[in-house]
Image (tube, helix red, strand yellow):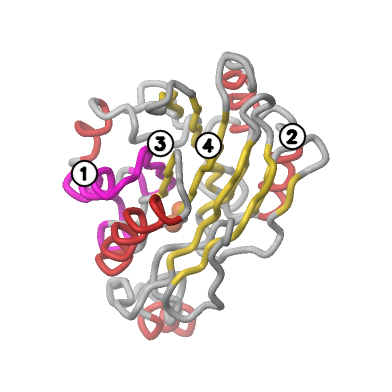
Amino acid sequence: MRIMFLGDVVGRTGREAAALALTRLRTELRVDLAIINAENASHGFGLAPDMARALFDAGADVITLGNHAWDRKEITGYIAETPRLIRPLNFPPGTPGAGSVTVELRDGRKAVVLNAMGRLFMDPLDCPFRLSAVELSKFKLGSSVQAIVIDFHAEATSEKMAYAHSFDGQVSLVVGTHTHCPSADHQILPGGTAFQSDAGMCGDYDSVIGMTKDIAAARFWRKMPGERLQPADGEPTICGLLLITNDTTGLAKAIHPIRLGGRLSQTIPSV
Ligand SMILES: [Fe+2]
Ligand SMILES: [Fe+2]
């Protein structure tokens, strides 16, 4: 299975570029399943239903979220009726939406996408390790489902690595989101799970993690709440990865980073 994952979409420029990239890369990279994290799509904070619809229309199969999941209030009704929009599974019981979804491809193959959130330097939530283990016990990779992808939304690289090693061999991919910086540690772990500690963002890198640099920097200089953060609106870089899995085992055969447009060094898989 050929699976594309794109990192946090930031603001209007990120949304528009991500929509174009989804449509273009789905064809160019012969993508079977496209997943995108859109927790920052609405001016950097949250996701509105019309924005989610636009990403689905452009070719996203599943949209994931993170700590900014609820910044746009309208999403709570929409997520309850949209199974392919998921939020971290370790929010407290009773939170709208679900933390995972099973997607059936046109050819009948099935993939599970799961979203969990870390706890180091993040708001306290239920344990992502234990809850992910419970959720994963419902599926058998390579038999009941052909692929399992986890978006682990976390700040700390240590927590992301510990999480990925914990589920090595049980899932096809653990990819981190939230830091907005693409890491160069993409690899296939010894048990066959692909891992990259952060996918990076779909946003303007002449910025502080996607937000206007002057306003963001002023907050560090002054240690006072300043002007409201605004998304930077220069040419975005589309960041993410292409994963190729073995349908028989569900494990990874290859992981290729994607960086397209904008300021970062460019890389597009040629496979
Ligand atoms: Fe984010
Ligand atoms: Fe985040």
Task: Choose the circle earlier in sequence order: 2 or 1.
Answer: 1
Nearest to N terminus: mark 1 or mark 3:
1
- The type of residue carrying mark 3 is Arg
Instruction: Answer whether labels 2 and 3 touch (C-beta < 8 Å).
Output: no
The residue beneath circle 2 is 168
Q: Which mark is residue 87?
A: 3
* C-alpha span from label 2 to label 1: 33 Å
Q: Which residue is mark 4?
A: 116
State the separation of the CA atoms marked 4 and 2. Answer: 16 Å
Measuring from the top left, give residue 223's x and y in whole percent. 46, 77
Q: Residue flagged by tag 4: what amino acid is it?
A: Ala
In reply to whether residue 10 is colored magenta, the answer given is: no
Mark 1 and mark 3: span between their CA atoms? 16 Å
The region drawn magenta spans 42-69
Between circles 2 and 3, the one closer to the viewer is: 2
Q: Are marks 1 and 4 in contact (CB under 8 Å)?
A: no
Question: Is 234 located above or below residue 76 in the figure?
Answer: below
- Label 2: how many Cα within 10 Å (few below 14, some 14–19, many 20+): many
Mark closer to the chain start, 4 or 2: 4
In what element is the residue under mark 3?
loop
Name which residue type carries label 2.
Asp
Q: Residue at 42% x, 25% y: name it.
A: 107
Task: Tell me: residue 107, above or below residue 13.
Answer: above
